[in-house]
Image: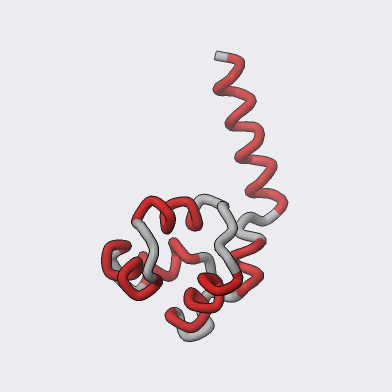
Amino acid sequence: MRLFEYLRSNGIKRSDFIKHLGVHELTLHNYIHGVFPSKKVADKIVEATNGEVQYSDIFFPMTEEEYKRSFEKGAKKREN
Protein backbone atom coordinates (compact mmCIF):
# COMPACT_ATOMS: atom_id res chain seq x y z
CA MET A 1 0.00 0.00 0.00
CA ARG A 2 1.33 3.40 -0.87
CA LEU A 3 1.85 5.96 1.85
CA PHE A 4 -0.88 8.36 0.69
CA GLU A 5 -3.34 5.44 0.55
CA TYR A 6 -2.38 4.38 4.05
CA LEU A 7 -2.87 7.87 5.45
CA ARG A 8 -6.20 8.34 3.68
CA SER A 9 -7.64 4.91 4.51
CA ASN A 10 -6.68 5.25 8.18
CA GLY A 11 -7.83 8.87 8.51
CA ILE A 12 -4.36 10.03 9.54
CA LYS A 13 -3.52 13.67 9.03
CA ARG A 14 -0.16 14.41 7.44
CA SER A 15 0.56 16.86 10.26
CA ASP A 16 0.22 14.01 12.79
CA PHE A 17 2.29 11.58 10.74
CA ILE A 18 5.22 13.98 10.31
CA LYS A 19 5.51 14.28 14.09
CA HIS A 20 6.12 10.56 14.29
CA LEU A 21 8.65 10.63 11.46
CA GLY A 22 10.37 13.78 12.62
CA VAL A 23 10.31 15.41 9.17
CA HIS A 24 8.93 18.65 7.71
CA GLU A 25 5.52 18.57 6.02
CA LEU A 26 7.07 19.42 2.65
CA THR A 27 9.43 16.48 3.07
CA LEU A 28 6.49 14.13 3.59
CA HIS A 29 4.79 15.65 0.54
CA ASN A 30 7.92 14.87 -1.47
CA TYR A 31 7.97 11.28 -0.24
CA ILE A 32 4.34 10.82 -1.24
CA HIS A 33 5.11 12.20 -4.70
CA GLY A 34 8.10 10.00 -5.44
CA VAL A 35 11.16 11.46 -3.71
CA PHE A 36 12.94 8.64 -1.94
CA PRO A 37 13.51 8.98 1.80
CA SER A 38 16.66 7.87 3.56
CA LYS A 39 16.81 4.26 4.77
CA LYS A 40 16.31 5.55 8.33
CA VAL A 41 13.08 7.37 7.40
CA ALA A 42 11.90 4.43 5.27
CA ASP A 43 12.37 2.20 8.32
CA LYS A 44 10.25 4.63 10.37
CA ILE A 45 7.51 4.65 7.71
CA VAL A 46 7.33 0.85 7.59
CA GLU A 47 7.32 0.69 11.39
CA ALA A 48 4.74 3.48 11.83
CA THR A 49 2.38 1.79 9.39
CA ASN A 50 2.84 -1.66 10.99
CA GLY A 51 4.17 -2.93 7.68
CA GLU A 52 1.15 -1.88 5.65
CA VAL A 53 3.49 0.36 3.66
CA GLN A 54 6.40 -1.78 2.51
CA TYR A 55 9.82 -0.79 1.23
CA SER A 56 8.71 -1.65 -2.29
CA ASP A 57 5.82 0.82 -1.92
CA ILE A 58 8.25 3.54 -0.86
CA PHE A 59 10.99 2.97 -3.41
CA PHE A 60 8.76 1.89 -6.33
CA PRO A 61 5.65 4.01 -5.74
CA MET A 62 4.15 3.76 -9.23
CA THR A 63 3.31 0.78 -11.36
CA GLU A 64 4.59 0.82 -14.92
CA GLU A 65 1.10 1.70 -16.18
CA GLU A 66 0.78 4.62 -13.75
CA TYR A 67 4.20 5.87 -14.80
CA LYS A 68 3.20 5.78 -18.47
CA ARG A 69 -0.03 7.67 -17.76
CA SER A 70 1.86 10.27 -15.73
CA PHE A 71 4.38 10.71 -18.53
CA GLU A 72 1.61 11.05 -21.13
CA LYS A 73 -0.18 13.67 -19.01
CA GLY A 74 3.02 15.69 -18.76
CA ALA A 75 3.60 15.46 -22.49
CA LYS A 76 0.06 16.71 -23.20
CA LYS A 77 0.51 19.66 -20.84
CA ARG A 78 3.74 20.62 -22.61
CA GLU A 79 1.98 20.50 -25.99
CA ASN A 80 -0.62 23.04 -24.84
Direction from residue 57 to residue 32 in the image, left or right: left
The correct choice, above or below, for 75 with respect to 41 in the image is above
Q: Identify which residue is drawn at 64% across, 25% down.
A: 75
> What is the count of numbered marks?
0
The correct choice, above or below, for 30 with respect to 53 in the image is above
Foreground residue, 46 or 67? 46
Q: Identify which residue is drawn at 61% across, 39% down.
A: 70
Foreground residue, 57 or 35? 35
The correct choice, above or below, for 67 with respect to 40 in the image is above
Q: Which residue lies furthest to the right in this view?
A: 64
User: Where residue 45 sits: x, y (%)?
Assistant: 48, 74
User: Where residue 2 sits: x, y (%)?
Assistant: 52, 65
Direction from residue 12 to residue 31 in the image, left or right: right
Q: Identify which residue is drawn at 69% across, 42% down.
A: 68
Q: Identify which residue is drawn at 44% across, 61% down.
A: 4
User: Where residue 59 sits: x, y (%)?
Assistant: 64, 63
User: Where residue 57 sits: x, y (%)?
Assistant: 60, 67
Q: Which colour scheme is used?
A: secondary structure
Quarter-of-image position of residue 76: top right
Q: In which quarter of the image is the N terminus?
A: bottom right
Foreground residue, 43 or 4? 43
Q: Quadrant of the C terminus?
A: top right
